[in-house]
Image (spheres, rainbow, N blue to C red):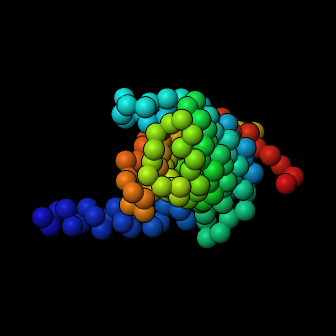
Amino acid sequence: MRKIGGFVKKLFFFALMVPFVLVGKEKVNLLSYGIGIYNALRTHQRTGEMRLEFKSRYEFATFRPMVGIMSTFQGSIYAYGGFGLDWIFKDHLVLSPDFAAGYFHKGGGKDLGCKWEFRSGIEVGWQWKNLSRCGLHFYHISNANLGHKNPGEESFVLFYAIPIKGL
């Protein structure tokens, strides 16, 4: 039991220190396009999705604001805003946890139980010298039990992000 407590303390310390040590030096606005699998971990109402997302170069306490819109092939739409972190290892490997909240329209797709949904996820990608990125994004959408039900959903998205300078 003692070993577990020591491990948790070290993990907590690492999680607090990583943003200050590994955050990328050069920041640019990013426009990201993604395509993937919506409701990926369940076969019922699994479908494709497309996403368009903007990440600002400006930071608030190392968090980057973002806004985006996601649409499924069944007509569901999720418009959201939130924050993410960029941890860049060796100038190329990018790890970006994020959190967002937004408005969900069911369309012809899965009923997530509420108009207001929350998204938490993580991107793993590769950043080139021109600061464009490509990678995978895994996220979960849930209403945090605010609705009449809370089935949630998970998505896997392949994305490509291009830097936008001058905004």
Q: Position of residue 104 (x, y in %)?
A: 56, 50
Occupied quadrant, residue 146: bottom left
Give 79 or 139, whichever is nearer the viewer.
Answer: 79
**Relative to 35, is 113 on the left or the right?**
left
The residue at 43%/31% (across/down) is 45
Q: Quadrant of the N terminus?
A: bottom left
12 displayed left or right of 31: left
Residue 27 place in picture, x, y as percent? 72, 54
Residue furthest to the bottom:
61
The percent coordinates of residue 121 (x first, y second) are 48, 49
The number of numbered badges drawn on the structure is: 0
Q: Would you place residue 40 above or below residue 67 in this image?
A: above
Instruction: Specify the quadrant of the image occupied by residue 143.
Output: bottom left
Q: Residue furthest right?
A: 166
Residue occupying the far left of the picture: 1
State whether residue 121 appears in this view: yes
Q: In the image shown, does 88 or 152 lie closer to the viewer?
A: 152
Residue located 80% across and 46% down the image: 164
Residue at 68% from the left image edge and 65% from the top image edge = 59
Of residues 108 and 76, the one drawn nearer to the viewer in this rendering = 108
The quadrant of the image that shows the C terminus is: bottom right
Up the image or down, 73 lies above or below 89; here it is above
Give the percent coordinates (x, y) of residue 142. Answer: 44, 53
When asked about the image quadrant of residue 128, the answer is top right
Seen at 44% across and 36% down, the residue is 39
Instruction: Mark yes or no: residue 90 visible.
Output: no
